[in-house]
């Protein structure tokens, strides 16, 4: 059953890829040229045989491609695991680097099994529980550690540092102790990378930056005769040059095949490495897949479960031949359209390993170190720190806390500390007791109200953040077949940036693609930045506060002898009695007020949202309206602007327009339609016609017992709402006066 499903999916993917195999092939060649030096550099920086990096990329391309879901990512080793590999060799190797590497391979096999289980158990959905600021802190720390480890190689200087912090503190001294010849290769490599990144010359852009660096460094190695040991005099000193500054690949690649050793499976540090590998692979795979989904021109979405399974399986195969763990990483794109570019790249790497390894033996280590330093710069880019700070001060604190803890105490301690700091900051700002905060954290109070007309209302109380976001996602996904969803956060004490990023950037694209979706209730929340995804916190002992407009509407209602309710409501059956809404479904109303004009006339006002059109052509409209409850019966009619019947009118085309010769201005400005011309002529007496001629044009409709008034197809400003009230109140006076005259006339007769 599973095998048949896999074959069908494989065949479907291959048929979809056939039209783009040429673009994927060209992209694969470009990526291979970039991958080769990076794989060699990552392996050497990890303290393992250089072929370990290439084995990882090959297994990732040949195996992971067949099982994964992501289309525009590539599989192979990642710089983020350099720190983990070095730690394992140091902790378990007892001074024997090769033995430590074998133990690391065993830990990779076990981690691969866990990753496969994650995929089979469909735990990919839990990728959202990683706090974005913690992740940035992890990546930033890894970048700084790589920088500290590679600077001695890039400058040709010996390092005396024992810890990551010492490596960073040592960098200024390295410039004083550098080998200037090696430094020259590094300087030229940096210049080429910068030139390639910022120049607009298409010939330079055609060749990837790493290829320029490798070509330049090999020429320098040849000119400096690095194949032979010798010394060079420079700045009054002698500097040693020779083969130890070049990549050392064995004549027989099979000499680099190393097998796992499980003999230390019962050691605590072994399982610590297993957990670390599993976390790093999971985090980077999830981040990479989501990043590429956002820019995929075809809008494809990655199944994270499949990608985790693919990384686990290919990591097992890679470790069994001496390769590093396989991670799903963001590629340098190069025009690839499907995941088969990753397979083509792997086949090209196989050709290189079997027939062309001699070309890698002339590459200076300084060039590979430069490429890794650029990778480290991307991981710890100043832009990451700047963007995190813009997201909110508390997010920046989490990032820095995570980063520093990793530098001083290691990855697992840093991740755990980052999560702890995140939770503590959210708890301290939530204004909740700890037990209540923890209860909301584990089980947020999500209330769902469904209506028969296809609308659904979701209200959240308490805390919604990266830990319980899955419950929110499941709730929203279950509503995908509805017509309208309103998410009310007015009683949510804390909404973190992960949730807001999902709501603002992902939910309508992935989970609710065919649904009208509105978020309300964030006006009263406070934030530490203006970023739309900044964490929102409801102030202590405050119910949802009113906006300035709502406060003013409340004061206006009070001035008109009324009361004000800002809450959202679906009690709109009364409005459906008007012909205007028979073809325009009402979605909801809010900011309701109710009062009386002159004791007899009851009025209601509200902001209204309704739709016009159907399915994919439906368009949402907003308006502010006033209803007048009549103390007497009135004729059915629709009064609308002469030039606007097709825009907002009731479309009562079966009734003719009633004109008044005595009031040509009124007849020119308005269309008046209804079933009884006689009743309408009696209702619209001279005083009412004079009044309407003196006022701005409104849409007015009577259903016999109520009159509906609307001025614009948008929410009214405060001043416009005052004018509508003045119009409605004056209209009620005219109607009451007219009704009294008619009543008196009837009594006399």
Image: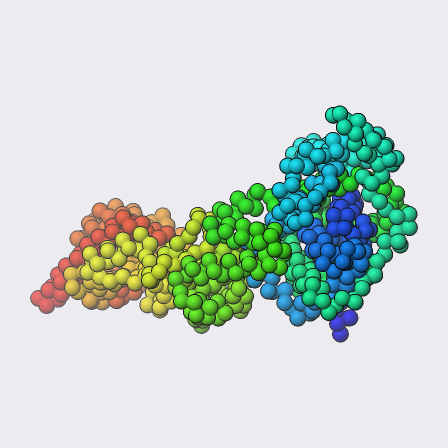
Q: Quadrant of residue 116?
A: bottom right
Give above or below for 535 relative to 235.
Answer: below
Residue at position x 79%, y 32% in the image: 239
Residue at position x 70%, y 34% in the image: 177
Extreme residue in the bottom direction: 1
Q: Position of residue 488 (x, y in %)?
A: 42, 63
Its colouring scheme is: rainbow
Q: Position of residue 47 (x, y in %)?
A: 76, 50
Residue at position x 49%, y 55% in the image: 497
Quadrant assignment for the N terminus: bottom right
Q: Quadrant of residue 15?
A: bottom right
Q: Position of residue 694 (x, y in %)?
A: 22, 47
Q: Position of residue 644 (x, y in %)?
A: 37, 50
Residue at position x 17%, y 53% in the image: 687
Residue 302 seen: no
Front-lying residue, 717 or 538: 538
Extreme residue in the top direction: 236
């Amino acid at each position: 059953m599973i095998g048949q499903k896999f074959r069908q999916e494989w065949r479907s993917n291959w048929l979809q890829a056939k039209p783009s195999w040429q673009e994927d092939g060209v992209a694969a060649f470009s990526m291979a040229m970039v991958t080769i030096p990076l794989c060699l550099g990552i392996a050497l920086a990890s303290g393992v045989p250089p072929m370990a990096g290439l084995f990882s990329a090959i297994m990732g391309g040949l195996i992971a491609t067949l099982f994964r879901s992501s289309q525009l990512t590539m599989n192979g080793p990642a710089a983020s695991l350099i720190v983990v590999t070095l730690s394992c060799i140091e902790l378990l190797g007892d001074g024997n680097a090769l033995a430590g590497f074998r133990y690391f391979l065993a830990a990779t096999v076990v981690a691969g099994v866990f990753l496969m289980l994650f995929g089979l158990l469909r735990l990919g959905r839990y990728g959202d529980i990683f706090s974005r600021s913690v992740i940035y802190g992890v990546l930033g720390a890894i970048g700084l550690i790589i920088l500290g480890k590679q600077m001695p190689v890039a400058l040709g200087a010996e390092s005396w540092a024992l810890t990551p912090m010492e490596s960073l503190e040592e960098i200024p001294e390295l410039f004083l102790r550098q080998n200037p010849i090696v430094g020259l290769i590094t300087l030229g490599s940096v210049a080429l990378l910068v030139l390639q990144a910022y120049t607009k010359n298409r010939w330079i852009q055609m060749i990837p930056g790493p290829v320029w660096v490798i070509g330049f460094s090999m020429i320098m190695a040849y000119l400096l005769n690095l194949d032979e040991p010798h010394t060079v005099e420079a700045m009054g000193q002698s500097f040693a040059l020779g083969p130890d500054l070049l990549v050392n690949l064995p004549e027989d690649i099979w000499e680099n095949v190393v097998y796992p050793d499980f003999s230390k499976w019962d050691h605590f540090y072994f399982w610590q490495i297993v957990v670390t590998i599993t976390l790093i692979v999971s985090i980077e795979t999830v981040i990479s897949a989501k990043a590429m989904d956002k820019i995929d021109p075809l809008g494809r979405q990655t199944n994270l479960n499949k990608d985790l399974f693919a990384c686990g399986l290919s990591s097992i195969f890679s470790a069994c031949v001496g390769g590093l763990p396989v991670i799903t990483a963001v590629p340098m794109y190069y025009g690839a359209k499907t995941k088969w570019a990753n397979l083509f790249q792997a086949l090209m790497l196989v050709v290189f390993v079997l027939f062309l390894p001699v070309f890698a033996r002339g590459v200076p280590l300084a060039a590979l170190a430069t490429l890794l330093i650029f990778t480290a710069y991307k991981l710890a880019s100043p832009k990451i720190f700047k963007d995190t700070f813009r997201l909110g001060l508390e997010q920046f604190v989490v990032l820095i806390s995570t980063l520093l803890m990793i530098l001083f105490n290691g990855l697992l301690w840093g991740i755990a500390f980052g999560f702890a700091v995140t939770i503590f900051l959210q708890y301290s700002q939530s204004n909740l007791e700890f037990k209540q905060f923890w209860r909301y954290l584990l089980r947020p109070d999500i209330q769902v109200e469904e209506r028969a007309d296809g609308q659904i209302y979701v209200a959240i109380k308490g805390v919604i953040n990266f830990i319980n976001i899955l419950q929110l996602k499941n709730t929203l996904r279950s509503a995908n077949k509805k017509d309208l969803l309103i998410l009310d956060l007015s009683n949510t004490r804390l909404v973190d940036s992960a949730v807001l990023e999902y709501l603002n950037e992902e939910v309508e694209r992935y989970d609710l693609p065919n649904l009208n979706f509105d978020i309300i209730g964030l006006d009263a929340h406070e934030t530490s930045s203006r970023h739309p995804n900044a964490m929102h916190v409801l102030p202590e002992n405050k119910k949802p506060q009113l906006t300035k407009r709502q406060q003013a509407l409340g004061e206006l209602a009070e001035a008109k002898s009324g009361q004000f309710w800002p809450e959202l409501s679906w009690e709109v059956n009364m409005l459906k009695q008007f012909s205007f809404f028979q073809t325009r479904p009402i979605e909801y109303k809010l900011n309701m007020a109710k009062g009386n004009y002159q004791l007899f006339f009851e009025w209601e006002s509200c902001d209204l949202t309704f739709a016009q059109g159907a399915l994919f052509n439906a368009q949402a409209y907003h308006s502010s309206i006033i209803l007048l409850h009549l103390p007497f019966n009135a004729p059915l009619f629709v009064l609308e602007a002469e030039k606007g019947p097709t825009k907002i009118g009731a479309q009562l085309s079966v009734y003719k327009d009633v004109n008044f010769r005595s009031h040509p201005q009124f007849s020119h400005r308005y269309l008046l339609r209804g079933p009884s011309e006689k009743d309408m002529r009696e209702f619209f007496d001279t005083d009412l016609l004079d009044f309407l001629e003196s006022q701005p044009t409104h849409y007015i409709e009577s259903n016999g017992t109520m009159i509906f008034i609307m001025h614009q197809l948008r929410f009214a400003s405060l001043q416009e709402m005052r004018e509508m009230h003045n119009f409605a109140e004056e209209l009620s006076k005219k109607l009451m006066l007219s009704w009294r005259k008619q009543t008196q006339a009837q009594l006399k007769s």
